[in-house]
Amino acid sequence: MDICSALAAHASKKHLRRLAAALGLQADAPGSLAALLETPPDAARAAVTQVFKKAPKEAQKLWAVVEEWMAEGPPEGALADPEEEDVGGGEEDGGEAEPPLPRSANACVECGKDTPFVFILLGCRLCERCEKRGGRYTLVPFPLAKSIHGLQDRDLHALNGHGEGISRVFLRADVEACAARAHQTAEKEVAALRAAAKKAWRAESFATDHKGHTHKWKQWNTHTYQQTQAIRKMTADPMMANLMELSGLVHVG
């Protein structure tokens, strides 16, 4: 079942769609409720708090329902999609339900079609199309995870990732959950980001000479400084383009 149908009694469709978008899901898509309940609790709670930041009481009520369903499972039939219901003869009209066809070992976990790729971070078969469509497979590189969420190296080293050094990538949901654990609140995360920005500004704005005296740099209006800033802007766009092309798929045949 989709998120909007299952949680319609607990929140408006507008807020449910915003919540789903914050987690990289589609609120009206079949199976989106199952994807929501499989989301790391810290990331899901952070998304609920963000979407309902102007209505904390509604956030508490919705999170209580989601948390209960995560722990004990949703009500019977809540995960079933309408198209999966039996529409052809059953016992009442004398028909017999056909047994489900066996699923191929090479089938994509999302669409069920055979694929030669495995999503390395989760160890499951996944096709290229479903990787791009499903927000749960979005990857975040090491430097971006640090700069966006104000995380330290020690925080990210504990996460499941792929690659080495600054080329290491993580699932976006894992990074968001790590940020929620590290900062507890959005206000603390913003404070951490400001502290990191202030530290970087001081490092770039002041210099210490051989006598240990600190001097403020006078190069902001120099040709060298302006040229350096121009180069940074030129390299920013390709970095974001490369981010959109990140993939966790490995060809295994």
Image: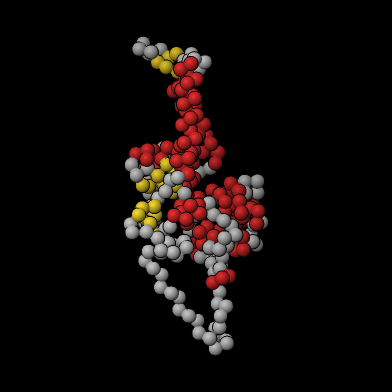
Q: Residue 61 appears in which quarter of the rendering?
A: bottom right
Q: Residue 252 appears in which quarter of the rendering?
A: bottom left
Query: Going 56% across and 70% down the picture, which residue do you hit?
Result: 83
Numbered-mark total: 0
Q: Is residue 218 above or below residue 252?
A: above
- Colour scheme of the picture: secondary structure
Instruction: Tell me residue 71's x, y (percent).
Output: 49, 61
Instruction: Tell me residue 77's x, y (percent).
Output: 55, 71
Instruction: Tell me residue 11's x, y (percent).
Output: 64, 57
Residue 99 visible in rendering: yes
Q: In the image shown, does 195 or 148 lie closer to the viewer?
A: 148
Q: Quadrant of the C terminus?
A: bottom left
Q: Is residue 153 above or below residue 124?
A: above
Q: Residue 141 appears in which quarter of the rendering?
A: top left
Q: Is residue 136 left or right of residue 56?
A: left
Instruction: Tell me residue 236's x, y (percent).
Output: 48, 33
Furthest-bottom residue in view? 94
Query: Going 54% across and 88% down the picture, which residue do you hit?
Result: 94
Q: Quadrant of the N terminus?
A: bottom right
Query: Going 46% across and 22% down the picture, which residue do you hit?
Result: 228
Q: Is residue 117 above or below residue 223?
A: below
Residue 175 visible in rendering: no
Query: Going 49% across and 25% down the picture, which residue do you hit?
Result: 230
